[in-house]
Amino acid sequence: MIVYLFIMLAVLAVGSALAMVINKNVVNSALFLVLNMVSLAGIFLILNAQFLAVIQVLVYAGAIMVLFLFVIMLLNVGDEEKLFDKFRIKYFLAFFLAIGVMGQIFYSLAGVTDMLPAISENMATLGTVEAAGDVLYTKYLLPFELTAILLTAAVVGALMIAQHKIKRTENI
């Protein structure tokens, strides 16, 4: 069952990535990118990488996609197109039916040819928050602290530039 779910999510990830690139509407492409990121988070959950799955949804599908959509709205791209003008439910259902059929075919072929991997017992502890925090705060402590200092300096620099522009426009 897990292999079947993995194959289905992998096909969904590849299909949504292709749809994102091929689609002409920018808003639809951004929504396909969200679908891609959620399917990747599902793959991370299947691989017992819970921390990466949560970060994938929170950071990428949440924060970064909100920024993308704000930029799209600010640029007024595609005002003449509505989001669901050409959306048909039969295309949606056909897409998911095709994913299911392809997943069943891949699972059947893998079961016949003995290509299904055996999962180690150590994999249950590798993707947890505790394992990521342990490695981050022991082995990679110096790069983590340097990244924090660099990001703090970038925020201070952005604030200084913004204040400089505000003072300059007040003087004019």
Image: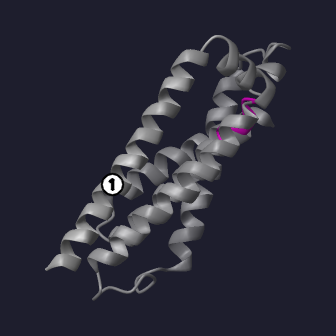
Q: Residues within 10 Å of mark 1 (few under 14, many from 20)?
A: few
| Magenta region | 43-48
Residue 61 shown in magenta? no
Secondary structure beneath label 1:
helix
- Kind of residue at disc 1: Met
Residue, x 60% and y 45% (percent of image)? 56
Q: Nearer the viewer, residue 89 or 119?
A: 119
Asked whether, in this view, residue 94 is left or right of residue 50, the answer is left
Q: Main secondary structure of the magenta part?
A: helix
**Residue 150 x/y as whole percent:** 43, 33
Q: Tell me how many marks there are.
A: 1
Residue, x 77% and y 31% (percent of image)? 129
**Residue 26 x/y as whole percent:** 33, 68
Residue 96: in sight, yes or no?
yes
Residue 104: in sight, yes or no?
no
Q: Which residue is mark 1?
A: 160
Q: Tell me: residue 78, above or below residue 30.
A: below
Q: Nearer the viewer, residue 70 or 11?
A: 70
**Residue 1 x/y as whole percent:** 81, 37
Residue, x 64% and y 43% (percent of image)? 55
Q: Nearer the viewer, residue 158 or 59?
A: 158
Q: Tell me: residue 103, above or below residue 147.
A: below
**Residue 136 x/y as whole percent:** 65, 21
**Colour scheme:** one colour
Residue, x 41% and y 87% (percent of image)? 85
**Quadrant in the picture for residue 40:** top right
Q: Tell me: residue 78, above or below residue 129.
A: below
